Amino acid sequence: MTNTTDNGRKGRVAVLGAGTMGAGIAQVAATAGFSVALFDVSKAQIDKARAGIAQSLEKLASKGKIDAPTKERALAAIAAFESVEDAVRDASFVVEAAPERMELKRELFLAVDRAAPADALLGSNTSSLSITEIASVVKDPTRVVGLHFFNPVPLMELLEVVRGVRTTDAVVDRALAFAKDLGKTPIVVRDFPGFATSRLGVVIGCEAIRMLEQGVASAEDIDRAMELGYRHPMGPLKLGDLVGLDVRLAILEHLHKELGEQFRPPALLRQMVRAGKLGKKSGEGFYKWDADGPKKA
Ligand code: CAA
């Protein structure tokens, strides 16, 4: 159970990184009643995140999923920071949502360790990197845990809680309570490359790209196959675009290194990332994206 603070919020969540995932995590934490400190090195990224959060809250309010005061309170509860130390200073929970590069994550956790309260839970939203390795840079690695969210964060129910080698039961229990507080359903997995979700998810995505390379069917028909034949809410190529092809490539490179040949990234994926075709966030991937959604590329 999370205690409320003087200002009536449930305590502070510091979110490090204002990309797609960081913005989504900030939104759900603010909607759930926490005050949120959102850090990014880029002011432009923070502005973009704020605009996206406002739009998403508006959409949810217009459908009656949240009421107007909740929307206003959530927006007002998010403060932007351009220093990690300032963002985490009063945090009860820290959720790092930076790009999937171990060096960057280690640097961020060193800064967090310098400034966060000693009893703050330290979480990483990594999709596949080792929580145990990330935890190794802080003085007390027992309080580090994986908090893996799914895109779009406000709509997806799962939170994958990843137990590092040194994470304590008490920290896992706290992470589970936090997940429920955010309205998510948690699962607990051991720290193993790709956890329970990414390892399975990228296999389908990767095969879909290979099928496209081999001319098995068009992107639209490969997606339709899984949407209509397997009832996936979204085909694997469209989903890759939504997640970000750079993110998919980083996960595959890591799993290829850790788990072997099965995860070798397809050449087409590398080429697209090199060309800046990153999916929805860059406006083009396997589809062209605009405000109305994906269209044939
Ligand atoms: N905020 C608020 N509302 C949103 C939203 C957001 N961010 N995104 C979409 N919506 C709304 C839409 O406006 C739409 O509303 P209406 O029904 O009133 O029109 C509703 O949600 C449904 O959206 P769509 O009609 O556009 O499409 P949909 O029915 O296919 O639902 C979806 C969209 C929920 C994204 C669904 O397609 C889906 O579940 N897709 C799979 C997502 C998935 O697998 N995510 C995991 C990716 S892996 C990951 O994130 C982890 C990682 O480590 C990389």
Image: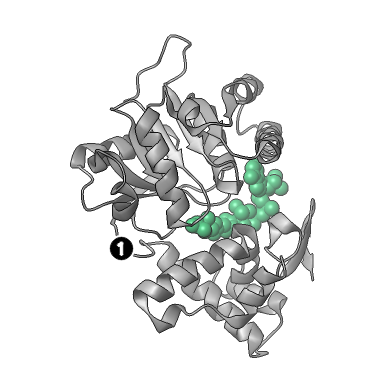
Q: Examine the rendered structure and indicate whether residue 42 appears above or below residue 76.
A: below
Is 69 left, or right, of 179 in this rendering? right
Is 61 left, or right, of 124 in this rendering? right
Q: Residue at x 55, y 66 (%)?
A: 248
Q: Residue at x 50, y 36 (%)?
A: 15
Q: Nearer the viewer, residue 228 or 182?
A: 182
* Element type where label 1 sits in the image: loop
The residue lying furthest to the top in this view is: 6
Q: Residue at x 23, y 45 (%)?
A: 167
Residue 180 in view (yes/no): no
Read off the residue under disc 1.
Answer: 192
Q: Quadrant of the N terminus?
A: top left
Is 75 left, or right, of 62 in this rendering? left
* Three-letter code, disc 1: Phe
Q: Examine the rendered structure and indicate whether residue 75 appears above or below residue 151.
A: above
Within 10 angstroms of label 1, few (less than 14), some, or many (20 or more) residues? Answer: some
The image position of residue 243, as x and y in percent, is 59, 59
The colouring scheme, among rainbow, by chain, secondary structure or one colour, is: one colour
Specify whether tag 1 is near ligand 1 (CB below 8 Å): no
Is 215 left, or right, of 148 in this rendering? right
The image position of residue 29, as x and y in percent, is 50, 32
The image position of residue 30, as x and y in percent, is 53, 28
Q: Residue at x 26, y 38 (%)?
A: 139
The image position of residue 80, as x and y in percent, is 60, 28
Q: Examine the rendered structure and indicate whether residue 87 appears above or below residue 293.
A: above
Query: Residue 58: which quarter of the image?
Result: top right
Residue 134 in view (yes/no): yes
Query: Residue 168: which quarter of the image?
Result: top left
Q: Quadrant of the C terminus?
A: bottom right
